[in-house]
Amino acid sequence: MSIPDSTATFPEYAPLPESALGPELNADGYYAGRVQDNLFWVTDGTYQSAFLATPDGVVLFDAPPTIGNNLRRAVDELTAAENLPNTVTHLVYSHHHADHAGASYLFGDVVRIGHAETRRLLQRDNDRARPAPEVTFEDSYTLEVGGSRVELAYHGPNHSPDNVYIHFPDHDTMMLIDVVNVGWVPIYNLNLSEDVPGYLDAPDRALEYSWTHYVGGHLGRLGTRDDVTLHQRYIADIVDSSHAALGSVDPTPYFARYGANAWAGVAGYLDAVTDAAAAPVIEKYTGVLGAADVPALTTTTTFSILQSIRLDLGGGSQVHP
Ligand SMILES: [Zn+2]
């Protein structure tokens, strides 16, 4: 890792909106609190996990390595306060990604539950930190532990091929990871999403369920239905702006300038379309969503959406006469 010298300059960004921030972390670097009844959530300010505390044990939902051993501390702290056992008996994977599952091994020999594709991908990845789930499902799965119920459902690929909807009908809560970053824009490339149409559709699928509290998996606070619709407006504005830019930016000068270097022409054109599409969205959401003005974020997300408009939807492509 290189260390910037004293003359390095760092870009300035707009102050974060209040809505980007969650509760303060404790001295160990985490916050753990109640979502509703015996459903709890844990954050380190960047990642989130959740757990059900029941008379028969604890059901953990995701185990991000950045929270790591603080998950154990959070479970111990809150189960003690509730006079409930602190033994983790089940671990549910939202999806296979290591940044949400890489502390799974800390919980040893528990019942791991996940989508069949999560099992396949974890077997492929062969990472001892993320044991593959033994209990799998294709479409839906109801888990009941100690009188608490959770409904897992698969609605097709979105952020990842295996990302599932975790609904707590008795706790008025939806947990959907890596789709809506509550109070913030997506990280690079539309939250590094593999299926863009599936990702764009996912918030609507989530809103079809009944819930009040949203666990998005990232940053420092829980979400509401309004947070999900604000995210949808940001994305819809990028989609609209992308269509407009595809219709207005002329590719001819880029291909004329670079001649035989075809990829330079393509890159020049696509970068120009991306910048034209992202600029009004960055301006509109600065101060509304955290990090909207960090250029690489809105710009790479715009690039992902633009490429999906071109490649999935056939937008902006012309057939040779
Ligand atoms: Zn992920």
Image (tube, rainbow, N blue to C red):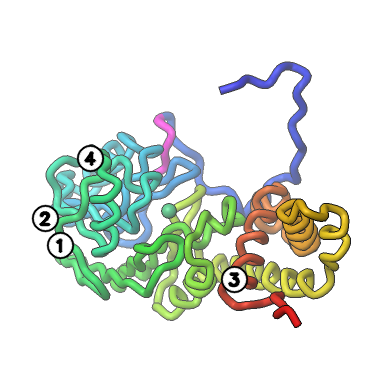
Q: 251 or 176: nearer the eye? A: 251
Q: Which residue is mark 4?
A: 105
For marks 4 and 1 on the same chain, the one whose residue lies earlier in the sequence: 4
For this orientation, the residue located farthest to the bottom is 321
Q: Which residue is mark 1?
A: 145
Q: Secondary structure at mark 2?
A: loop
The quarter of the picture where residue 283 lies is bottom right
- Asked if marks 1 and 2 touch (Cβ < 8 Å), the reply is yes
Q: Which residue is mark 3?
A: 311
Where residue 68 appears, as percent x and y from the top left, is 33, 37
Give the Cα separation between the discs numbered 4 and 2. Answer: 21 Å
Q: Image point 30% across, 46% down: which residue?
A: 125
Q: Considering the whole magenta stretch, tell me its main secondary structure.
A: loop
Q: Which residue is mark 2?
A: 56
Nearest to the eye among marks 2 and 3: give it.
3
Q: Amino acid at mark 3?
A: Leu
Q: Residues within 10 Å of mark 1 (few under 14, many from 20)?
A: some
Give the Cα separation between the discs numbered 4 and 3. Answer: 39 Å
Q: How many marks?
A: 4
Viewed as shown, does residue 312 lie left or right of 240?
A: left
